[in-house]
Image (cartoon, rainbow, N blue to C red):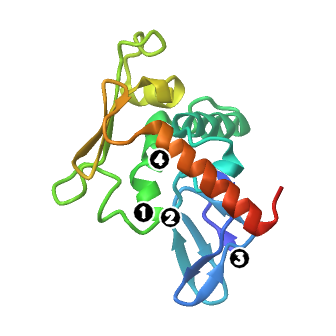
Amino acid sequence: MTMEPGAPDIKAGEVHVKDGVIVAVGQKLKAPGATIINGVGMIDIPVGLSVDTVELMGNADMFGIMKFIQNIENGKSESEFKLTARRVLELATIEGARSMGIADKVGSLVPGKRADLIMVSTRDVNLGVFGDPAHMLVTAAQPSNVDTVVVDGRILKRGGKLVVLNAAQVTREAAAANAALRQRANWW
């Protein structure tokens, strides 16, 4: 198996299948947009950022994940400019959608796709001094800075407050489902 030269290393944690061929199980991938050549042929594997479970990550803070990925790659390469903030945003948006096979529906704001977006307040003290929006979002933004969330054209959060969901009820239901799952799995 050979890898695309010059791309950052990312450890594969999933099984990738294309045309019935299993690739990248426990292998090091080159990302983003890893190209793996095996005995069958060349397979392109889109690479993006996502959170599949809070249990493993500790939280679902995509801002923290973006900052972590940029810092790890830039530290490894000993260049604070190796992985740009704009590229990290692409990995978290359109590349994330491509890696899940849903880029035709989400991942960018274009006509015909779902209207999924977040609006971040730049009036908060941790964001007020930035000039470049990509740099601001990747290096300084936090979940508390999210003012508005729109999913599929529907406003779910406005003015920093949930407008559709009852947070206490969702938390109770999620905790109950988690406890039931752990009990069925005999986990803890």
Q: Residue at x 58, y 37 (%)?
A: 82
Q: Gap in Å between the C-alphas at discs 4 and 3?
A: 27 Å
Circle number at residue 145: none
Looking at the picture, which amino acid does disc 3 mark? Met
Circle number at residue 46: 2
Looking at the picture, which amino acid does disc 4 mark? Ala
Which of the 4 image quarters holds residue 60?
Answer: top right
- Furthest residue to the left? 111
Tell which circle, 2 or 4, labels the residue nearer the N-terminal end.
2
Tell which circle, 2 or 1, labels the residue nearer the N-terminal end.
2
Q: Which percent across, then down, holds residue 165? A: 37, 42
Q: Gap in Å between the C-alphas at discs 4 and 1?
A: 10 Å
Quadrant containing the C terminus in the rendered view: bottom right
Circle number at residue 1: 3
Q: Residue at x 49, y 30 (%)?
A: 143
Q: Are marks 2 and 1 in contact (CB under 8 Å)?
A: yes
| Badge 1: residue crowd in 10 Å (few <14, some 14–19, many ≥20) | many
The label nearer to you, 1 versus 3, is 1
Tell which circle, 4 or 3, labels the residue nearer the N-terminal end.
3
Q: Gap in Å between the C-alphas at discs 2 and 4?
A: 12 Å
Q: Mark 4 points at which residue?
A: 92
